[in-house]
Amino acid sequence: MKLKNLVLNTIGIFIFSTIFSGTIIFPEKAYALSGREIMEKVNERDDGDRSISEMEMILIDKKGKKRVRKIKTYGREKGKDSQSLMFFLSPADVKNTGFLTFDYDESGKDDDQWLYLPALRKTKRIASGDKSGSFMGSDLNYSDMTSPDLDLYDYTLMKETEVKGTKVWQIKTVPKTKAEAEKSGYSKSVVFIRQDNFMMIRAVRWVYKKKRNKYFDARKIEKIDGIWVSTELHVTTKSGKKTLHKTILKQNNIRFNQDEVNEDLFTIRRLEKGL
Amino acid sequence: MKKIIAKIEARFEQLGYFVFARRWHVILAALVLFGALASQVPNIVIDTSNEAFFEADDPILTQYDAFRDQFGRDEVVVVTIQPKDVFERQFLEQLKAFHEDLENEVPYLDEVISLVNVTSIKGEADELLVKELLEDWPEDEAGIAALKKDVLSNKFYKNLLISEDGTFTTVIIRSNAFTGEDTLTEDSEFGEDMFEDEGDSDSTENADVSELGEAPSDRISEQQNTEFTTAIASVVQRYTTPEFPTNVAGSPVMTGVLKDEMMRNIPRFTLMALGLIAILLLLLFRTPVGVFLPLLTVIMSLISAVGLMSLSGTPFTVVTQILPSLLLAVGVGYSVHLLTIYFHHVQRNGDKEKAIVFALGHSGLAIFMTSLTTAGGLISFVPAPLAPVSALGLFGAIGVLLAVFYTLFFVPAVLAVLPVSKKRIDSDSKRSSLADKILGGFGMFAVNRPWTVVLGSVLLAFVAVGGITQLRFSHDVISWFPEDNPIRLATEVVDENLKGATTIEFIIDTGKINGVKDPDFMQRLDDFNHLAEQWKPAASADYENLQVGKSSSIADTLKQIHQALNENQEEFYVVPEDRDLIGQELILFENSGSDDLENVVDSQFSQARITVKTSWADAGAYTEMIRQLEEIAHELFADAKEIIVTGLVPLLVRTIDLVMLSMVISYSAAALIITLMMILLLTDWRLGLWSMIPNFLPILMGLGLMGALDLPLDMASMLVGSIALGLAVDDTVHFLHNFRRYFHESGNVKEAVSNTLQTAGRAMLFTTVALSIGFFVYTQATLKNLFSFGLITGFTIIMALLADLLLAPAMMALIYRNQDANSKLKETL
């Protein structure tokens, strides 16, 4: 009898201490979720489907001079991939210029993008595996507009903190390979995820191979049709403390589950029709 | 007048009593002053940048800063590589590794551009490719052949990244124009302030392109530029092999090399001058005190002056680097005069106090007067618009006054403290009597044949003027380096094979938002490029090799896009006529990820930049080119709000203008100041004016020699006139001061001249030798502009001595011919 108790107790202690020591030995703190897990939830977050919006892009140079562009945007999820169609509304010389983009989830598969120039009445396919390129000349990269492949990054939960009164997780994300850093355009980021809705509301990114940083700040977020949307995003590129350039991205009149947003919309034929 | 002089001399004697009585206090005070200034010396800065030549508020400089604030630094480092075959896999792989190492290791880097990452815009059937040229590595020989064809047919790459014959390729390395701190780390505090707006600007008007966004203090410093070029040099060295032969050119490198040369020169020449002067002093005084005290005095005044420079934030530049040798040579004379008389007296009477008093009484005034004239000559530089020249004038004058201060206070105090030297100063040695004989011989010849001397001088003056007409102004940093210097050779390689790397920048401000996108304006930008590239110098010009290598602007980028969108067909390499199309093509380009547009246009598309590339030449050669290109620009862009010409070349041209202006101002100022001083010192305005002839003639001869030897008149050699004037006049002062005294006693010109030369003559000879040594030392310089400065100034000083040994006595003989009849004149002396 005594021996059996002894053995059971020993096993119990062994199991207990393994579990217990695990939380001490692992480098991450004993939070409920790990950095990676949080980012998974961010990716999984429903950011809406079959959307239409009028995007307003304000570009501000270091002297404070502004340029404004208005773009009508349609978006659709196709399984794990996503599709978008954009038409410039203004300025006048680029009205009706259109971009059709297929963003593939599959690792290593490049995006497909087509551009329609009304003045030439031609559609050109744009080949670019490079997501480090700027989106429409703004401070955002293409990589900022799409979800990252989580397997290509190391995530470290740094701490819990607050942004404007709401609790957030502060997570460090670092690309695992130089190739990914080059491709995304960033060598490192610190992102701030809201604990209540898993939205990334702030980020600081280190630009790859340049002594610059980008500061992302979701100034306005709204719940529309049950979906949390960032309706005003400020992105500032700085060198040290000096602002080099800034973009304000506003999503006006965004609505989801629109009937007209279907498969036929995301075709070259529709692209060439214009607005 | 004599009374006033006697009074002043009496004051100097009183100074002698004071110093003797309070010798330890005086020594302490002098050492405290010295210590305070010397402590600042380690902070001294060396600045060899082109910007250092300008005052901070010079419009050319502020315009240049505004330009760089908008478009980045225009000065680049160009590394040329001439392998056996550029389009060969192994070389391309080396190039890529080289490029990447540069990106990783060079600090303050803005960008590295080479065939590896230059923007390639190509269209194929349905597809448009905007990417870095070697983003897709060529897989096989066919790929390489295609690459070669693309590169050689690309008009944009030609003479920028690849030579016309395809054998040279370049890597262009650009630093930041302005550097800021970079303190953000992952552990930083990401507070609200980081994400706040800096203050909204609602203005949509265009700012003047000459408005400054950066403070000049953020401009990349000498130190940082050196780190930049040194890092490049070390990467280059690692990769250079016979298969990867390199040349490194570009003005940032030039600035760095110049700084290295200076840092080597300054201590070298200072020590050389010190050594030679020490030897001279030993020969003269034959006692350690006679060597030690004068050297100590000049070293103290030099270090004090440098300390003041450091305190005021004034940097050492290519001009101020002559200050040490100048002060050494000049300052030594003062203590020599004092010590000569002191030793003479103390040997005879053995009483230190009396000797000090006597020495100060007899030579104090003359020493002080000569320091004033020298300082006067240097002060004449202060109003010069060339900043380093102005600094040299100010700190040179301060140094001279410090030297005289130390001589009149510190030296007597030390003498009072030291034991009396047992050694006799042999004033009757063979050597000195030989010197006296020669000096006397000159003087007597002049007095006996005054008209011969005067006519001979007039003749020499004419000859000199002939030489002066050959003089040419110059500012050509490259020519300062010896012919085999790597930077000089590299620049020649770049100029020959890539048609140059020196640029003139035009900014055309349309005054309207999106004004640049107007098809007509774009076409005119393109027209400008064609016209500029056709520019040739006039047939008679000195610089037939000068040419415009390339002119480029946003029009070129637009043409490339337009061609690519039309299946790469050659005939579409033109500016589109449709305004909307231009807007759309530019949006396309902005979307491609390339930030090339930042460099050629502002964000509002209201200001376009045109870069005109040319080979290196003397700054004066560009004047005509700039003028004609400006004419073309004003004709083509008559409706522009503003046209600005800036960049390195205009900076150089402006420098040469400032050299000329500085010369005119400082020579006039020196002539005026010193003439006035001579009038005051001699208390007779006629005599004062006459006395300037033996002072001006040597300057004329010096400049004449420069012209005859085809030595250029640049910012170093231009200093000759004012410096030499200030120094040459010392001899005249000593001569006339003593002549006047002896003439008053004897009433006989011959006797007076003879006595003058016997006493003051030896000191005049010594100071002339010391000074010419101080300047001939520069003929050993590796920098050629210093060579001509040293040679001519030394020559001029020797001529000044001869003028005072011949012309001055001759003039006295003629002026005081009827001395007995002219008793009034006698009384004024």
Image (cartoon, rainbow, N blue to C red):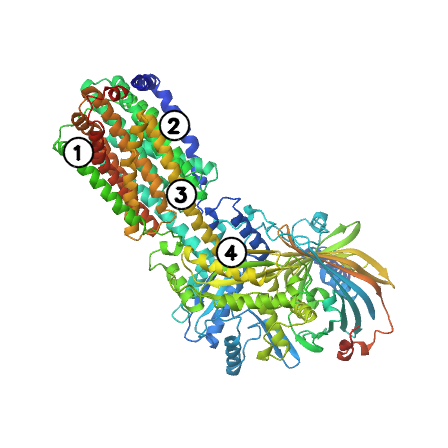
Q: Amino acid at mark 2?
A: Leu
Expressed as whole percent of the image width and height from the top left, the position of residue A60 reads 69, 56
For the residue pair B307 and B681, the one nearer the viewer reads as B681
Q: Give the residue pinned by disc 3.
A: B664
Relative to B251, say whether B276 is above or below.
above
Q: Chain of mark 3?
A: B
Q: Which amino acid is tagged 1? A: Leu
Q: Amino acid at mark 3?
A: Val
Q: Residues within 10 Å of mark 1 (few under 14, many from 20)?
A: many
**Residue, disc 2:** B31
Q: Earlier in the sequence, mark 1 or mark 2?
A: 2
Mark pair 3, 2: CA separation: 40 Å
Vertical placement of residue B73 versus B57, above or below: below
Mark 2–mark 4 Cα distance, whole angstroms, equals 48 Å
Instruction: Give the residue pinned by disc 4.
Output: B647
In the drawing, what numbered circle is on residue B439? 1
Which label lies toward us, 3 or 1? 3
